[in-house]
Image (tube, rainbow, N blue to C red):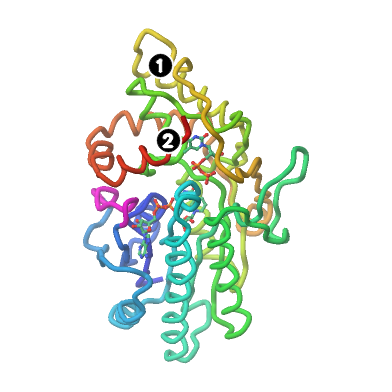
Amino acid sequence: MKNVLVTGGAGFIGSNFIRTLQIKEPLVHVYNLDALTYSGSLENLRGLPDESRHSFIHGDICDGALVDRVLQDHEIDTIVHFAAESHVDRSILGPGQFVQTNIVGTYTLLESARKYWAANGGLDSARFRFHHISTDEVFGTLKPGEPAWTEEIPYAPSSPYSASKASADHLVRSYGHTYHFPYTLTNCSNNYGPNQFPEKLIPLIILNALENKPLPVYGDGNQIRDWLHVQDHCDAIYLVLKQAKDRSSYNIGGGNQPTNLSIVHKICDLVDEMSPCGTPRRGLIQYVKDRPGHDRRYAMDSSKISRELGWVPTHTLELGLRETTEWYLGHPEWVSAIRQQVEYQSWVVKNYEERK
Ligand code: NAD
Ligand code: TYD
C-alpha cells in the first residue's frame, strides 16, 4: 500500500480508519473522497496523526469522471470503500438516495476502478485491491436461538438500506467473478465509538441523557444488535487489507449482544455517574412507535477472521461504552458543530414527531 483512496473518510468509520491506517502505515498517503453529506464532517478529521499524508477531495462517488481522475492522478493502489447512506430509518423515509449512493455509487466506483486496473495490465491483488465495507444487515434477521451468521449464509435483506448494501455487495462479487477484479469484502455488525453521527442509537441516547431529554426506545426494546467498537473494526479491516486472499470475505462482529433496552440502561447509569443530575436517567426512557419491518436480532460469527487472520475484538461492551460516553461528554464543540446543522434538527423532528 502506498496511495490509498478512502471513500467516505469524513464519516464515522472512515475517519477512524484513516487514523488507524496512518498510525500503522507511516508511508501511506490517504486520498479521502467524500461528498460531505449530512453525516460527513471535516471536524472528524481534525488532529490526524499526519496531516501531510492526507488529501481531502470533496466529491461524489457517483461522478465517474472525477473518480477516474483521482485514480490516475494519484496512482492509487488500494481503494477502501466506506461511502454510503447508512441509516435504516432514513432509508425507510426516503429510499431513493440509498439506491443512488449505495448501488449507483458503488457501481460507478467499481467501473472506474476496473478500467484503471485493466489499463495497468490487470495488476494482481498484491499490487491493487478494492476493499468493500458492508453490513451484517444484508443477512436479514435471526430468530431467538438461531446460530450467528457465517460468511456462507444467503442474503435476505429487509430494509431499503440493507437491500441497497446487498446489491452493492453482489456487484462487487460479480466484478471479481466476471473480470477477476481483485476485491475483498467485509460485513460488520453495529459499530459504536467516537465521532458517530448522533442519529444512531448509542450517541443519540448519550446526548439526550446528558440533556435530560426523552430517550426513545422503538417497540419493546428487546431487539438485539452485535455491538462492535469502531477501533476493533478498523483493526480488522487493516488485517484484511494486509493478509486476506483475493476475493475473500469476512464477517466482523463485536461478540456483544445485549438488548437495546439494556444498552440504554447502561448508558443512563454511565451518564448518571459522569454527570449527576439528582434523578436517575432511566426515568427518561420513552417507548415509541416501532420502526416498520424492524429486524429483531443480529449476531455475527467472526470465527473465520479470528482463525485465518488472528483478529479478536479487544473492547468489552462495558469498557467501550464507558470510553464512548466519556468521549461525547468530553467533546462538546464537536457535538454542537454537528447538531447545529439545520438538516440534523429537521431529521429529529421528522423521525420522532410521528413516533409520539
Ligand atoms: P457515515 O454515515 O458516518 O459516513 C458516510 C460517509 O460517506 C460520510 O462522510 C458521507 O459524507 C459520505 N458519503 C455519502 N454519500 C457519498 C457519496 N455519494 N460520495 C462520497 N461520499 C459520500 O457512515 P458510517 O457509519 O461511517 O458507515 C461507513 C460504512 O460502513 C458504510 O458503507 C456503512 O454501510 C457501513 N457500515 C456501518 C455500520 C455502522 O454501525 N455504522 C455497520 C455496518 C456497516
Ligand atoms: P441504529 O443505531 O439506527 O442502527 P441499526 O438500525 O443499523 O441497527 O439502531 C440500533 C437499534 O436501536 C435498532 O434496533 C433500532 C433501535 N433504536 C431505538 O430504539 N431508538 C432510536 O431512537 C434509534 C435511533 C434506534
**Where residue 68 sits: x, y (%)?**
34, 81
The answer to whether the residue bearing label 2 lies less than 8 angstroms from the nearest atom of ligand 2 is yes
The amino acid type, in three-letter code, at marker 2 is: Tyr
- The residue sitting at 50% across, 50% down in the picture is 92
- The residue sitting at 45% across, 55% down in the picture is 94
Residue labelled with disc 2: 352
Q: How many marks?
A: 2
**Where residue 207 sits: x, y (%)?**
36, 29
Circle 2 crowding by C-alpha within 10 Å: few under 14, some 14–19, many from 20:
few
> Which-is-in-front pick, marks 2 and 1?
2
In this rendering, the answer to whether 317 lies above or below 74 is above
Write the start and end of the magenta stretch as one range.
37-47
- The residue sitting at 65% across, 40% down in the picture is 296
User: 252 and 311: which one is in front?
Assistant: 252
Q: Is residue 255 magenta?
A: no
- The residue sitting at 41% across, 85% down in the picture is 116
The amino acid type, in three-letter code, at marker 1 is: Asp
In this rendering, the answer to whether 292 lies above or below 14 is above
User: 347 and 208: which one is in front?
Assistant: 347
Residue labelled with disc 1: 272
- Answer whether labels 2 and 1 touch (C-beta < 8 Å): no
- Picture quarter containing residue 182? bottom right
User: 81 and 344: which one is in front?
Assistant: 344
Q: Is residue 42 magenta?
A: yes
Number of the label disc, if any, that sits on residue 5? none
- Picture quarter containing residue 185? bottom right
Q: Is residue 296 left or right of residue 331?
A: right
Q: CA distance from mark 2 to mark 1?
A: 24 Å
Q: Residue furthest top?
A: 278
**Where residue 340 sits: x, y (%)?**
23, 40
**Where residue 152 sits: x, y (%)?**
72, 61
User: 132 and 169: which one is in front?
Assistant: 169
